[in-house]
Image (cartoon, coloured by chain):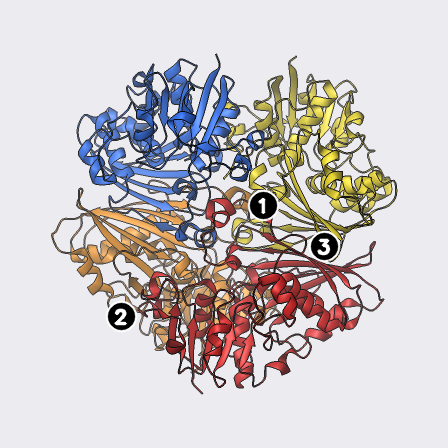
Chain colours: A yellow, B red, C orange, D blue
Amino acid sequence: MTVRIAVAGASGYAGGELLRLLLAHPEVEIGALTAGGNAGSPLGEHQPHLLPLADRVLLDTTAETLAGHDVVFLALPHGRSAEIAAQLGPDTLVVDCGADHRLTDAAAWTRWYGGEHAGSWPYGLPELPGGREALVGTKRVAVPGCYPTVSSLALAPAVAAGIIEDDVTVVAVSGTSGAGKSSKPHLIGSEVMGSLSAYGVAGAHRHTPEITQNLSAVAGREVGVSFTPVLAPLPRGILATCSARLTSDEDPRAVYEKAYRDEPFVHLLPEGRWPTTAAVLGSNAVQLQLAVDPDLRRLVVVAAVDNLTKGTAGAAVQSMNIAIGLPETTGLSTVGVAP
Amino acid sequence: MTVRIAVAGASGYAGGELLRLLLAHPEVEIGALTAGGNAGSPLGEHQPHLLPLADRVLLDTTAETLAGHDVVFLALPHGRSAEIAAQLGPDTLVVDCGADHRLTDAAAWTRWYGGEHAGSWPYGLPELPGGREALVGTKRVAVPGCYPTVSSLALAPAVAAGIIEDDVTVVAVSGTSGAGKSSKPHLIGSEVMGSLSAYGVAGAHRHTPEITQNLSAVAGREVGVSFTPVLAPLPRGILATCSARLTSDEDPRAVYEKAYRDEPFVHLLPEGRWPTTAAVLGSNAVQLQLAVDPDLRRLVVVAAVDNLTKGTAGAAVQSMNIAIGLPETTGLSTVGVAP
Amino acid sequence: MTVRIAVAGASGYAGGELLRLLLAHPEVEIGALTAGGNAGSPLGEHQPHLLPLADRVLLDTTAETLAGHDVVFLALPHGRSAEIAAQLGPDTLVVDCGADHRLTDAAAWTRWYGGEHAGSWPYGLPELPGGREALVGTKRVAVPGCYPTVSSLALAPAVAAGIIEDDVTVVAVSGTSGAGKSSKPHLIGSEVMGSLSAYGVAGAHRHTPEITQNLSAVAGREVGVSFTPVLAPLPRGILATCSARLTSDEDPRAVYEKAYRDEPFVHLLPEGRWPTTAAVLGSNAVQLQLAVDPDLRRLVVVAAVDNLTKGTAGAAVQSMNIAIGLPETTGLSTVGVAP
Amino acid sequence: MTVRIAVAGASGYAGGELLRLLLAHPEVEIGALTAGGNAGSPLGEHQPHLLPLADRVLLDTTAETLAGHDVVFLALPHGRSAEIAAQLGPDTLVVDCGADHRLTDAAAWTRWYGGEHAGSWPYGLPELPGGREALVGTKRVAVPGCYPTVSSLALAPAVAAGIIEDDVTVVAVSGTSGAGKSSKPHLIGSEVMGSLSAYGVAGAHRHTPEITQNLSAVAGREVGVSFTPVLAPLPRGILATCSARLTSDEDPRAVYEKAYRDEPFVHLLPEGRWPTTAAVLGSNAVQLQLAVDPDLRRLVVVAAVDNLTKGTAGAAVQSMNIAIGLPETTGLSTVGVAP
């Protein structure tokens, strides 16, 4: 099978990571690459690490340039995907790395993003209960946010098993690429190197309702999520520390082992080893470890993910594989680039 | 007044930071500098940033070399301080940057550090209720751990005011210098740069009982503290994200403003600005901000500190100033080195 | 003596470093702080590390706001300084951290910067032969560029002694703050962390003619300078590797020892120790070491400087001290902030 | 074809990178993994990024454990390879990532490494003139050092074409992984982050004679190489700035285009784009750019390489491919992991 793909937003970080993965995908042929302001220039100016595509000229992001592909990946600012997708026709698989179609609740969408909700699409996190089935044969995929990916995978087994309170705390430390290739003053190198900062504190980050949606769906009731993202000086990687009080004597380790035993990308580490983001750099793996605080009876789960790979582009490719009937792991690796 | 000081452990990070601060202290004369394995070599080999002291030769850490000073700062591995202090005589002010005399509970000491408890000393965190008074005129000071400093200052006002539940969560992201100048494999540059990792999870870090002790003393009852430290790729700085559910309708901001209004080193930032560790690098300031999650009624406090300055050596100098009757801020700055 | 100073460009990196140093200067009173686009906002929004000045509101950069000060520091984009300085009157000491008045050759100015040359001012590098004398009593100072500072100090003694060929090579690795607080795409954190890049190669960087000017003035004849700057992932610091073939049997070490023996800020390290930028972070010191390649008879000098301190703001304060008759080292330190 | 391989020294950085590449090599089956002090423990403890091999137990590095493989990769401290290789038999392809067999001159070996020279092997840098031919069918390969790889590739075309003087200067800035996974005090994270340092200055680094050997072989006469390595705060990557005076009017660009036109891994970038190490992270590509200083008639070549990939393990795999008759690029990529 040769799948002809296009990438809209090829000059950004999500677009670059999609192309890095797709260049190693054995069933894919890379078609149109499009951009906004960078249209007309060669990809090599923007993604010098993608040597085999260096001379490809970026096209405008329009329905015309994206037409004629089996799969179109959208790596666009939120608000743009719905517009483009509407013009792509129901036979094209559209995989949206943006936020437009993640939230199921229209009111929540409007509260967090403003404007009108474009509707929700099947959610590209196959490791959640029922997640894989929802993707088979779909023509539309909403790729999860990076923080929701790691937070949901860290907590879903405990929530599903009903062994923790519905009051969870997530502090997720992230590299800077999650903020995109935008040159905002607080993201310049001189500001981020040697510094740590919190942002979007106390429910002010847009990924909060997405994590809440995922865990509440798993629980079958509303789960309260306190989410704080912290920016740290590294380009890639998220380490999430997630905790909640235990309500059961069941062994949490057994719960997680059972939940992820057959998952190709989610790895509960052997006892005594803790995840690091370096170990998943460039890989589609999630590494997890957990412990119980004996004095507090609180479960703490720590999870590491590469925000651009499993947190974005890897999940997009994984979802495509499922949607079009390829083996789920095709073109994806659990091997990181370290040190 | 000229205070003659000695520093034991001058070749390590805490020792180096003590000397950096003491070189700028107008009332201090720097006497003996001692070390363990590095004794006999010039300080310049170990602390090339301390040019004015480059030719000073490190002495052995013994009661003899430390004798004859008004103040002796101990920056030694835990277990060593009690032994040395016992030989220094009751008229010498001994400021211990190590852990030996921080915990008041002998059983807790033995559980966390092993061996016999050497007793507790007045605790060098003057910003805690009653903390300043306990230091006036003392001849012995136990300098707090870096994580307990930032965590306790972030939560003490809310605990003291009784506006939060006795179940607090702290995730503190730290630079690497807190681990000392030891060359453990996981601390080499190739491992820490580009990576994030958690350690001492679920109550397994020795600073947990110290935070619990501080907050419980403030509350007058046992406070449960879930503490997770995360290692990030920067040399200095801790950013702590602390949260607990509110139990009161009182405005937390007013509580914190009142608590820290007159403190020279603890700054609640104006609304809308969040702390960064870069802003306190090399300074004795703590920067704080807080917010309430409107959906969860959870208070989130974020605090930034330099682990080597206010987190260790700055607190030591501040405590010395109080103990010997100098103005508390002498030789200490609230100006950071950024970017 | 109380010197009333103003800083134009207070929200940028050079302005911030000037204020950090001036806050610790015992003879200075800080007056007007001005900015371009940031005028009207409090300094704390832009320089959160300068707590004592956090509430100061930035004024517009005009002759009016800068009037009435003994000293005005200009930390402005090139081209702006001449214009402002012309309006400040001959009795005000104007210290220009920008490039406008560094080059003595009008044709070189026009070639490298474009536009008309505003004339040259006494050059703020007192450690060059005759440099100190040129600053005494002056009312105008051109602060050197950061690369010219470290490169000139590394090579001047050998050039002055006539022991090397007039064909020198400088490769200077720099942190990112030298590029200013501008959010150009290649300077965002995600791009600079984990990467090294060269720029302005083969005589294309504007600091090349300034280094050439300095060394040629020392030599009394044209010296050829091959200069390559390299960008590395750290906020501050420049490490310059400078080399040239020896033409004499004289001991280079003796030449450098003699040249810098009485300099308070330039330190030739003891044999066997090599400079690091961490050791001079935030300090006004330059650390130097040299060696001779025995097979090639080539002298290699390595020098470390903090580009914002001795490379910019420290040199500005040092020059002010000389110009107004204060001890040269007032308010300046040779102690770095490490690790 | 299935090639059965073993890796000696699998717990170090070179060993880890070999395994990362070999896991993606379609013709390879991974056999014995051996180590020194880490023998007996699972690979996952040392290389957590190599998930598919996490449970493999490390064996002792002996001729017995390494026997029975088609190819044995040695990633051992220098001095160990010759000893092991002697026991492996002439039919096994031995690819030595260490220094034992790189130098052809026994006296140079003894001067730089001490002890007796074990003899030289075919040199694994196929892009040098005659380099590819020397590897076809060989049973022994000496993988080049990382600095010699990038320096030699940057300068060989100009040397071969006779367009520069025999007096070249190389300043190569490197990440820390080149120093291996050893926990020397100057390599701990707190020391390297935020700092730059030079080492092995003025011909004191062991890679100097190897670069000299390569360029002299290309030139057919002795070339003088001034080599200075600089350590910078990133885990991987070398950026080398190489320069020499031009002796010819020939266009250097044409010389380099011709030299590398057909090379799969060495890329001369289009004019105006300069190499970055991020663009080659984890890739086997070398990115080059050059310019001529118009005032000095000096050629400056800047080259970027990943020290662990093309600088070590990638070159090892590339050499294996040539030696055993596989297409040279099998299992190797020119796609980097960025940002």
Task: Kindly identify which residue carries mark 1.
Answer: A183
* Numbered mark located on residue B115 in the image: none
Query: Residue B29: x percent and y percent?
Result: 40, 80
Query: Residue C272: x percent and y percent?
Result: 27, 55
- Earlier in the chain: of badge 1 and badge 3, it is 1
| Residue found at x 17% / y 28% | D221
Q: Are marks 2 and 3 in contact (CB under 8 Å)?
A: no
Task: Kindly identify which residue carries mark 2.
Answer: C133
Query: Of helix, strand and loop, which one carries label 3?
Result: loop
Spatial CA distance of label 2 from label 3 is 71 Å
Is disc 1 in the same subunit as disc 2? no
Q: Are marks 1 and 2 in contact (CB under 8 Å)?
A: no
**Residue type highlighted by circle 2:** Glu
Query: Residue D241: x percent and y percent?
Result: 34, 39
Q: Residue furthest right?
A: A221
**Residue type highlighted by circle 1:** Ser
Task: Kindly identify which residue carries mark 3.
Answer: A294
Which chain does the residue under circle 3 lie in? A
Query: Residue C279: x percent and y percent?
Result: 39, 60
Specify whether C11 is left or right of D329. Answer: right
Which chain does the residue under circle 1 lie in? A
| Residue C194 seen in the figure | yes
